[in-house]
Image (cartoon, helix red, strand yellow):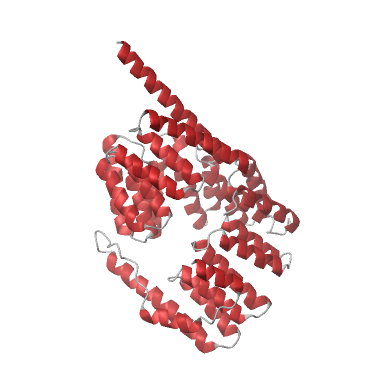
Amino acid sequence: SSSSSSSSSSQTDLDLRLYRARKKSRDGDREVNKTKKRALYKESEQLFRQVIRINPRNGRAYVGLAKTLERMKQIDLAKRVLEDGCAATKGENGHIWQVWACLEAKQGDVRKARQYFDAAITADDTLISAYHSWAMLEQRQRNYAKAKQLLVKALARAEQEEKPQSHVYVALARLAERGKDFEAARAWYQRGVSSGNFRDCGPALTSWAILEAKQGNIQVSRDLFRKSLKGAKARYAWLSLGTWEQRWGNISEAREILKEANELFPADGAIAQAYAQAFTKSSEDVDSDMDLARELFGKAIEVDEDNQHAYLSWAMGEWLLAKDVDRARDLFQQGIWSGPTTNQAAKLFSTWAHLEAVEDQNIELARNLYSCAYKIKPRSTKILRNWAKEERKIGDRLRGQELEVLAQSIQTDYRRKLDSQVVQTVWPDNALPSKSNSVSGIIGELTVEIVDEFITKWNNYF
């Protein structure tokens, strides 16, 4: 009896330590001050490590510790913790495998991510979140049939185990949207909203609201957004509503919404960036205010120094509103260095290229910048077509035509492969077409010698 009591007391102590560790980590997420944020994460790390020392097979501690280390950008250490967790639990904890898979997916290692998602489901075939996360990976890889297959499995398991499934319905709705089957999407969203606790259905309401906004049903969309603001995960709802009010031309209303959102979620970099960007917009009723926007962009960067969307929006404001081209160039560079190989870095490069072509008509530098963007996103027809426009503007029709033909060939190749895969039950892993030799040849001819110091350093990094 005393042994049983001692065991119960020990478990209670572990649960309390885990609760405190998670709370410290969440507090760190909400903290704006960087020094305080890091201190909270370090306290969380120490508590998780205490639990692991007491019970080396506690899977929740490994998961929590890895996530906290990821927040501190200690990615390699987070992976080692997850590897240790898998070893300690003999590979039988699906949650550890899933977190490891998600981490590899964020780092761009799709092969490892798939391998670890498979291990997660093998360890626990009722782990709905693993099916869902894997499906999201396949969707990003444009393997839509595979994504649907995983979601259907997740739904079957959720119903069998009587687990919450709103997020699975949302994912299926988005697949239906992609296929232009909007009625089916609405039906899935309706199921997502009506399943489980209302507070857990915020993402379903928000995604449904965005669908209606895209379809031009403004009042329906606004009503759905308003309902989703009450959900447990309302940050994205606030951000989306503020963004759509801007698109509908209600700049003043958008600013008010984003101001309130910024006060509610001061550590959210995306909301801070959107709030700042709202002051670069104008309408018949309100003017833009670049001075205030500049101040708010600075705060957004303080919240998240790697927020490339903020750097891009700020640079555009300095260029188009303040007419400060040099400052815009500096912001483009800062934004690129905050994540030199991301898709957003490609956007920064291509926008910077357009600036050089328009302001100084420096087509050589513009070409260098477009080629950097293309290097990051070698399947982007948008980059190639924007580049082609610049070439035609300066009178180089042949080069512009070559780029346009290249873009068209990529688009045709993608559509042909997409059509061929619709009838397949599961798409192969190599669904995306690989870059042909002719593509490499054309880009190689178009890329002139890079002499700019910044681009040279970036190419060495890349």
For the point 26% across and 59% down, the residue is 426
Image quadrant holding the N terminus, namely top left
Q: Nearer the viewer, residue 273 or 255?
A: 273
- Residue ID at (61%, 43%): 34
Residue 4, how many percent across, how many down? 31, 15
Residue 29, by quadrant, is top right
The front one of 146 and 449 is 449
Give 374 or 259, whichever is nearer the viewer: 374
Residue 357 visible, this angle: yes
* Residue 15 at x, y percent in the picture: 41, 26
Q: Quadrant of residue 332?
A: bottom right
User: x%, y% of residue 159?
Assistant: 29, 38
301 sits left or right of 375 in the view: right
368 sits to left or right of 379: right
User: Which residue occupies 68% across, 62% down?
Assistant: 317
| Vertical position of residue 52 compared to residue 407: above or below | above
| Relative height, residue 335 to residue 357 (above, below) | above
Q: Is residue 140 left or right of residue 366?
A: left
Q: Residue at x 72, y 52 (%)?
A: 295
Residue 14 image position (x, y, % from top left): 41, 25
Q: Does residue 230 show up? A: no
